[in-house]
């Protein structure tokens, strides 16, 4: 099947000032739509170099997909470069001009000549309306039928245009008969080698669906990808593999696809009608930030305290000064009292506490940098504690501890709600 190549435009990309998430998004969606991408490119805001890149791409491939450089400013040169590469002039696209005039009237600002430039498209091209911005995208054609799809660089504008207009166009144009569907199962609490061990032969033997393991810090995802002529057929290939993997990893899969540990926790809290509180020391509120990022979390997350200084642990959570003096702030006993204090004082059903040494300073021989204690208090049952020694720089230690804390909470809720 004919292929396409992606061209991301922007000098910021070449200077390392901007991470090219657009290319990743486009590549992922085209792969899922069964459209072959044989190369990706990044090029600066230079008309000749953009045109040369496009010319080279459409010598090899059926089409080029560009993002960026469609705006009104002097360094937005993609349209001009496409015209150069395809040997086309421009023509005014009235609906884009109307939309722009209405938008400028609504905000009470005069429209400049350079805005009008945005409503001009390469002659004979197919416009791609941009309800989320001013610059329309377009699909321009060379006389032999090869094409260039150009979309804005702003991800919020590019994404709906790609999904709603460009992918259907490409599937039709390139005769893509196959589609790829992906299911991701997110696990927590198991190491990569353990996941690998449990599903090893499945993923070695399976060609379609293909199974892959992706390890993050203290989280492992299992990706199941199937290729078929329809979404339904691809999903039918995924289903038995998914059932088998879910059986083998039971108790550790917190969610599928877009789920996050926090969204899974929020669902369990909702299902169990439970409220949670936090007492965070060295995670500095990161667990609270994760929980509150989920819409509707106010129903189940009561609140938390960042009890960094010992005086706050004592005054706000009722940790005993004697305990800190005897065992230190980073200890099972302190963590237990922090969790207990948070649960009782915040009127929650369950509370999680973290205390640890994020470094780079503050470590000793028996309490090294990376030492972390977690405690979970749930009222009747005895308070549970966990000890970890985490490696890495300060930020990595804090991030890992956050994942571990969320994992502890999820596993506890998952077990208690299933009982
Ligand atoms: P518009 O005219 O709608 O503003 P544009 O096509 O002119 O869009 P650019 O000026 O190239 O877009 O980029 C605008 C912003 O979009 C960039 O500052 C950046 O924040 C984001 N952006 C551009 N290209 C990319 C990319 N490849 N990946 C992620 N973000 C990008």
Image (tube, rainbow, N blue to C red):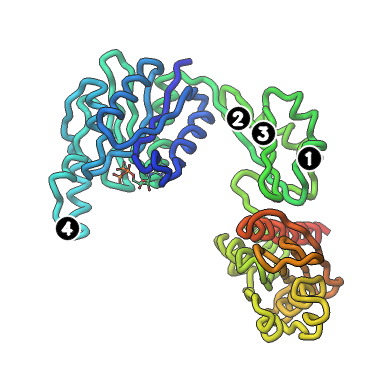
Q: Quadrant of residue 281?
A: bottom right
Along the polypeptide, which appears first: circle 4 or circle 2?
Answer: 4
- Mark 2 and 1 residues: CB-CB less than 8 Å, in contact? no
SS for tag 3? strand
Q: Which element type, helix, strand or loop, lies under badge 2?
A: helix
Tell me the crowding category of disc 1: few under 14, some 14 to 19, or many 20 or more residues within 10 angstroms, Cα based: few
Between the C-alphas of marks 4 and 2, the distance is 50 Å
> Which residue is identified by label 3?
224
Residue corresponding to mark 4:
109
Can you tell me whether the CB of the residue at mark 2 lies under 8 Å from the nearest atom of ligand 1?
Answer: no
- Residue at the disc numbered 2: 232
Q: Which one is in front in this view, the residue at disc 4 or the one at disc 1?
A: 1
| Mark 4 vs mark 2: in front | 4
Classify the position of ligand 1 by quadrant: top left, top right, bottom left or bottom right.
top left
Gap in angstroms between the C-alphas marked 4 and 1: 60 Å
Give the alpha-carbon distance from disc 1 to disc 3, as whole Å: 18 Å
Q: Which mark is residue 193?
A: 1
Q: Are marks 1 and 3 in contact (CB under 8 Å)?
A: no
Q: Rounded to the nearest whole Å, what is the CA distance between mark 2 and mark 1?
A: 32 Å
* Residue 403 x/y as whole percent: 68, 56
């Amino acid at each position: 099947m004919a292929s396409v190549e992606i061209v991301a435009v922007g000098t910021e990309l070449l200077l390392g000032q901007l991470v090219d998430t657009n290319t990743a998004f486009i590549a992922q969606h085209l792969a899922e739509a069964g459209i072959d991408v044989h190369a990706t490119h990044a090029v600066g805001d230079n008309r000749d170099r953009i045109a040369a890149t496009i010319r080279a791409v459409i010598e090899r491939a059926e089409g080029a997909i560009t993002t960026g450089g469609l705006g009104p400013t002097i360094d937005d040169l993609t349209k001009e470069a496409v015209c150069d590469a395809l040997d086309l002039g421009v023509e005014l696209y009235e609906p884009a001009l109307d939309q722009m005039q209405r938008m400028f009237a609504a905000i009470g600002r005069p429209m400049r000549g350079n805005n009008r430039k945005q409503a001009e498209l390469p002659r004979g091209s197919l416009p791609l309306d941009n309800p989320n911005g001013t610059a329309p995208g377009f699909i321009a054609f060379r006389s032999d039928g090869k094409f260039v799809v150009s979309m804005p660089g702003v991800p919020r504008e590019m994404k709906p245009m790609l999904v709603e207009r460009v992918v259907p166009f490409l599937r039709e144009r390139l005769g893509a008969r196959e589609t790829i569907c992906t299911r991701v199962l997110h696990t927590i609490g198991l190491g990569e080698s353990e996941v690998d061990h449990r599903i090893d032969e499945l993923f070695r033997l399976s060609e379609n669906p293909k199974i892959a393991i992706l390890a993050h810090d203290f989280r492992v995802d299992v990706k199941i990808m199937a290729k078929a002529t329809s979404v339904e057929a691809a999903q039918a290939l995924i289903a038995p593999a998914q059932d088998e993997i879910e059986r083998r990893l039971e108790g550790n899969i917190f969610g599928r696809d877009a789920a996050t540990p926090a969204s899974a926790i929020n669902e369990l809290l909702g299902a169990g009608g439970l409220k949670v509180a936090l007492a965070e020391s060295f995670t500095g509120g990161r667990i609270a930030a994760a929980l509150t990022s989920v819409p509707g979390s106010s129903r189940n997350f009561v609140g938390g305290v960042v009890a960094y200084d010992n005086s706050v642990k004592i005054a706000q959570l009722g940790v005993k000064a004697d305990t800190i003096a005897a065992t230190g702030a980073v200890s099972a006993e302190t963590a237990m009292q922090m969790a207990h204090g948070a649960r009782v004082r915040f009127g929650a059903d369950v509370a999680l506490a973290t205390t640890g040494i994020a470094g780079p300073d503050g470590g000793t021989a028996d309490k090294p940098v990376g030492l972390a204690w977690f405690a979970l208090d749930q009222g009747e049952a005895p308070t549970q504690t966990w000890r970890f020694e985490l490696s890495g720089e300060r930020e990595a230690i804090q991030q890992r501890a956050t994942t571990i804390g969320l994992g502890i909470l999820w596993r506890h809720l998952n077990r208690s709600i299933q009982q």
